[in-house]
Image: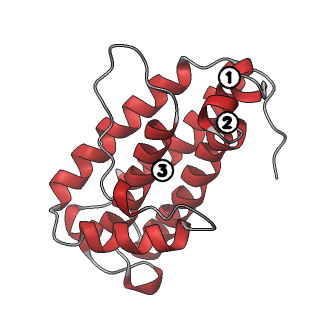
Amino acid sequence: MTETPGTMPEIIARNDQAVQRALKALGRLSPAQMVAPLLTDERTVKDVLAHMTWWDLWLLATLPAVPGAPPIVLPLADQIPSSGQWADEMNAKVFSYNQSRPLSEILVEFATTLERLLDRVALLTLDDLYAPDGMSAVVGQPVAPLILGIYEHYDEHAHEFEQLCASLGV
């Protein structure tokens, strides 16, 4: 595991590094490859992009809104369990929800949500991430793991996309 960055510019750069890795690999794939069940468990790249988008939207909805920003619309928000470990349950619901949606729609939503998330993170301070009586108190959970988790999430899927590209020879 890499060392946790200590400043907001370092956190932003680290997140951007993982995002750029994912985008670079995605840029090597054709639309046909993105909708073919070529990933583990017969998943498609489209499925993973929809999954990533939902979690980015969830994070945006979890953080306090920026004054004047349009509201976050989180599909399936009313189906999030109120307790316990619910990530796998929501991943399954997100998968089902997005099955009939076209790739073009998923790609647009992915790009716009990612841009919005990165813009939101750019407005945060270290106090927002680490002060227990600040944003964490408003959100109801520590904010730092959520923001640092952007890197881990994008890094995980960038690796998955890179492996797919390698297996396809693209």
> Is 141 placed left or right of 28 in the picture?
right
Q: Position of residue 5 (x, y in %)?
A: 78, 31
Q: Which mark is residue 22?
A: 3
Mark 2 → mark 1, Cα distance in angstroms: 7 Å
Circles 3 and 1: CB atoms closer than 8 Å: no
Which residue is painted at 47% across and 82% down in the image?
40
Q: Earlier in the sequence, mark 2 or mark 1?
A: 1
Q: Residue furthest front?
A: 82
Q: Return the x and y of residue 34 as percentages of the image width and height.
A: 28, 66
> Residue 127, relative to residue 100: is it above or below?
above
Q: Which residue is mark 2?
A: 143
| Residue 162 appears left or right of 83 | left
161 to 41, vertically: above or below:
above
Which residue is depicted at the point 46% across and 52% down? Answer: 55
Q: How is the image coloured?
A: secondary structure
From this viewpoint, which residue is outermost toward the bottom? Answer: 41
Judged left or right of residue 106, residue 38 is right
Label 3 SS: helix
* Amino acid type, callout 3: Ala
Q: CA distance from mark 3 to mark 2?
A: 23 Å
Q: Name the quadrant containing residue 25.
A: bottom left
Few, some or many C-alpha atoms within 10 Å of disc 1 (few <14, some 14-19, many ≥20)?
A: some
Position above or below: 25 against 16? below
Which residue does the image show at 36% across and 71% down from the upper left? 93
Per the image, label 1 sits on a secondary structure element best described as helix
Depth order, front residue of 150/143: 143
- Position of residue 75 measured from the top left corner of the image (x, y, whole percent): 30, 54
Report the residue marked by disc 1: 128
